[in-house]
Structures are given as structure tokens and as C-alpha cells.
Image (cartoon, helix red, strand yellow):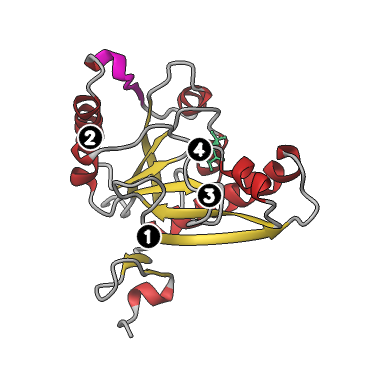
Amino acid sequence: MTDPVVLKVAVLASGTGTNLQALIDQVHGRDGVRIVAVGSDKPEALALERAQAAGIETALFPVSDFNGNRAARDGAMADWLRARGVQLVVLAGYMQILGPAFLDRFADQVINLHPALLPAFPGLDAVNQALAYGAKVFGVTVHFVDEGVDSGPVIMQRAVELPDARVLDDVLPHVHALEHQMLPEVVRLFARGAVRIASTHPRRVLVGPLAVLPER
Ligand code: GRF
């Protein structure tokens, strides 16, 4: 019997890895998805423990192991993932910018999760940026990664109205709940071949039935 077709996914994470955990719990080993590798730049990242507990191979790529040379680090990480047949790389709280040494090897195969409705509030501390701005609607964006900061084409966005939010704790539980729903959903869509960038418009991402229908 031949193996069913499975999308080989890698996750890069620098922190607690609750989004990795959502992927492990909701899609890993089913729905045509297998997480085959988890990489990090931080030895203390809880994400590594979560991966190991799920029997997923892990590796550390701190830039200090590469004499501070980020391109060399990115290249080594790309080699490691390619050797494992990775077809989709998910950045889930990965706190490093990926350069061309990585992105050129995974064209349109790297996605990121951002805790704001882009293009509002890119970069670090997005929820605090939104609070400081006085925003009344918060949200999450899943997008393709390009060489800019949170600037790639949008795959999915969801919003939550919180007009009375004042501090981080008023917002974070809502944002995390959205993230833990959206990321598994998006990865499942990739496994079904239901995500693609429109040939006529480099910023338009066709999702679900749209991705398999002729463009208009
Ligand atoms: C998430 O809020 C995500 O939006 C941001 O980093 C956080 C990672 O959280 N990019 P976790 O490590 O998955 O818990």
C-alpha cells in the first residue's frame, strides 16, 4: 500500500509554543498533515519540549553557533528542513527575520502568524501598539513571509471587537483563541492544496474553493 499524500510541515518558534501545541493537537498526524521538524534559535524555548513530547525531531540554530552570521544560520536551517522534505514552514512566534538565504529556498512556502490586523501594527509588541493607538478592534493575521517585516500577502484575518480593552490581559486571551483556531485551519487548507497566490495579482491569496477555481 502506498502512503497517503501528506504535507510535511516544519515549525520555527522562539517561545512558549502554544501555537505549535495547537498544531500538534489539531492537525499533526491527520488531515494530510505531518509536523516533521521544529527549529528554534533559543535553547530555552518551551516549544522544543512540546515538540519532543510529541515525538517530533527538533534542532537549535542560535546565531552564536555561526559567529553571528545570520545568512549562514539561515542557510543551515534551510538545509536541515530540505533534508526532511519540508513543504511548508510555519513561523509561530519565531523572533528572527529570515533572509534570502532561507526564503529563496522556500518560495511561497513560509507563513507567519501576527497578532494584529496587518498592515496595522507590524513588528514587535503588536497588541501593545494597538492598545496605545486606542484601537477598538483587534485581531490576527496569517500571511506569507517575504523579506519585509510582516509585509507578505495575507492568507487569513480574523477580528475581535474589544472596545473597552485597556491592558494586554484584556486582549491576549482573545487573540490567542483566534490564533489557535486559525493556524490549524490554514495548515489544513495548505494540505488540501487550497491556498495559492493569484497569478494576476501578487498580493491576492486565493483560499478554499477559490484556489481551485479559475481566476476572475
Ligand atoms: C503569537 O502571539 C504570535 O502571534 C506571535 O508570537 C506569539 C507566539 O505565541 N508571532 P506562542 O509561542 O505560540 O505561544
Residue named by callout 3: 121
Q: Amino acid at mark 3?
A: Phe
Q: Is residue 32 visible?
A: no
**Labels 2 and 1: the sequence-earlier one:** 2
Residue displayed at 43% across by 34% down: 94
The three-letter amino acid code for the residue at tag 4 is Leu
Numbered tag placed on residue 153 in the rendering: 1
For the question of whether residue 159 can be seen, the reply is yes
| Position of residue 22 measured from the top left corner of the image (x, y, whole percent) | 56, 42
Q: CA distance from mark 2 to mark 3?
A: 29 Å
Left/right of residue 25 with respect to residue 196 in the rendered view: right
**Residue at mark 4: C-beta within 8 A of ligand 1:** no
- Residue at 52%, 55% (x, y): give it: 120
Residue located farthest toward the bottom when viewing the structure as drawn? 216
Q: Decide whether residue 60 is among the magenta residues.
A: yes
Distance of mark 3 from mark 1, alpha carbons?
15 Å
Camera-side residue: 141 or 79? 141
The x and y percentages for residue 213 are 34, 80
Q: Under tag 4, what secondary structure?
A: loop
Q: Are marks 2 and 1 in contact (CB under 8 Å)?
A: no
Q: Amino acid at mark 2?
A: Ala
Question: Looking at the image, is mark 3 or mark 1 nearer the viewer?
Answer: 3
Which callout, 1 or 4, points at the residue further toward the start of the chain? 4
Give the residue number, with chain letter if any, for mark 2.
Answer: 78
| 160 or 119: nearer the viewer | 119
Choose mark 2 or mark 3, whichever is in front: 3
